[in-house]
Image: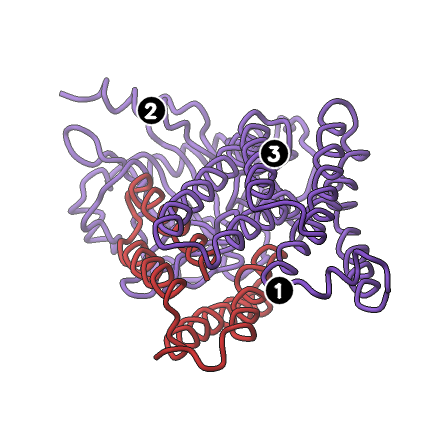
Amino acid sequence: MLFQATLVAVSAVEATVIGAATGFGVASPAILSVVLAVVLLVIARRSSKRMVRGIQWFLLTSAAVDLVLAVALGRTLLDPVALMTRIALPVSILRLSPKRAAS
Amino acid sequence: MSYVGSPMYEVTAEHAAALLSIPVVLGLLTFARRSQRQWSTAYRGLPAVRRLLVSLVAIDATMHLFLGPTHGGRLGLALFSFGVVGWVLARRLILGSTRSAGTIVWALSGLAAYAVAAVSGRTTVDQVGTASKLLELAALASVLVRVQRVRFALGSAGLVATAVMVAAASWAGAMEAGGHGHELGEVPAPGVLLPQSEDRDPTPAEVAAAARFHRTVAAAIAPYQSLAAAAEAGFAVENLAGSAWHADNPVHKADGRIFDPEAPETLVYAEGPDGPVLVGAMFQMDGLRNPGPAIGGPLTVWHAHDHVCLSLVPLGLAGLTGPFGSCPPGTITIPLTNEMIHVWTVPGAPEPFGDLDETWLEMYLSSAAG
């Protein structure tokens, strides 16, 4: 989850920089990225099963929407790196997260 | 219609061999589950996090062993050596004769070397390179599991800083490798798709057609330097900002007219010291993969976009898919857009079609001030 938090933090920096550079970026993705990165960093240390699963399912749903769009519009799957970070990583966390974590 | 995109979202030929590392390491791990050798018995007895770390190091090391021969020269030797050291590290991790420091030094050296190579253009930023760096970042993260609170906080901050550095280097490398003129045969920047075709000289007829079209567009959109006139014609000119503000016209987008100089789908404004300046227009095709009419041959190259991050609340562009494969949370990824072409009508523009040089535009706006 620490690794996942790191990737989300990178996303937050990218969204902020690109938004500032282009002038037509919107702030909400950057804000959401920062919030999610902080939450992930905190629960990477003290995991709450419900929260872990909630975030992983949120990320997986988002990846699923993009996968559907990629197949429907781009006639392709997600890129290999995206498959690693957006599907394999959340699935691994769901499988490896403790069965009885403090909630 | 087939396109050429940025290598950042693809697997380049020089890195494809590294994909062989996945079946090789999976085969070795399967072997390790059954074999009675010392290292395989020791591997089976490791905690899950340590086994994960060994797997990450082994896959990354094997990728580098494959990358060495395909690169050749000093870079190839460095890559191969990094792979050999990685395997030595993996063996020591299994046998318990090394601590976290070895993993940290090995992973950080790989990440730093990649960042330097990407920025200097010595390696192509692609999916294989990024996947390799993800494995090294994941290895670093796994070292931080179950450490004390202060070390965890410091380590997390260092991990995030390292990941940001690698992402920034990847962006810089990919941007530097990409061309900026929307010309046939060039490597596009991230997010830009160009038709797959060789560059060639335009014919005299194509030069004449392009010039004629450009003159017609310039005359047709000249009245829209007035924002009031543009708004009256249906262009969304509210809240103009930045150096390339695209003011859409929903009616023109839906009218079915293609490349009509009298009805551009979008006007482009730049924010100058004395207010918005009309710098050109953008024409769009209807539907995906419909090639635009290249009336000027290689002078009028249409382009599409890929890996676009779109925020839903509020609706707007939120950037491009990053090197680590993600758009920011709360956005969706648009994998492909319809084709479009810019026509630059601002006086003295270096290129009448394609991409407008930002440095030139800044100089033009500052000289036109007052």
The amino acid at mark 3 is: Pro
Q: Position of residue B62 (x, y in %)?
A: 75, 46
Q: Position of residue B7 (x, y in %)?
A: 62, 42
Question: Residue A47 versus residue B170: which sits nearer the camera?
Answer: A47
Label 3: chain letter: B
Count of number-bearing discs: 3
Circles 1, 3 touching at the beta carbon (< 8 Å): no
Which residue of the protein is positioned furthest toward the bottom in this rendering? A100
Q: Position of residue B207 (x, y in %)?
A: 57, 28
The amino acid at mark 1 is: Pro
Q: CA distance from mark 1 to mark 3?
A: 60 Å
**Residue B129 occupies which quadrant of the picture?**
top right
> Within 10 Å of the Cα at label 1, are there few (<14), some (14-19), or many (20+) other Cα atoms?
few
> Within 10 Å of the Cα at label 2, are there few (<14), some (14-19), or many (20+) other Cα atoms?
few
Question: Residue B199 versus residue B70: which sits nearer the camera?
Answer: B70
Q: Is B194 positioned to the left or the right of B252 in the image?
A: right
From the viewer's perspective, is residue A3 above or below residue B17?
A: below
The residue tagged 3 is B298
**SS class of the residue under badge 1?**
loop
Q: Is B285 positioned to the left or the right of B2 in the image?
A: left
Callout 1 and callout 3 share a chain: yes
Q: Is A17 positioned to the left or the right of B55 in the image?
A: left
The residue tagged 2 is B347
Chain displayed in purple: B
The residue tagged 1 is B47
Chain displayed in red: A
Callout 3 and callout 2 share a chain: yes
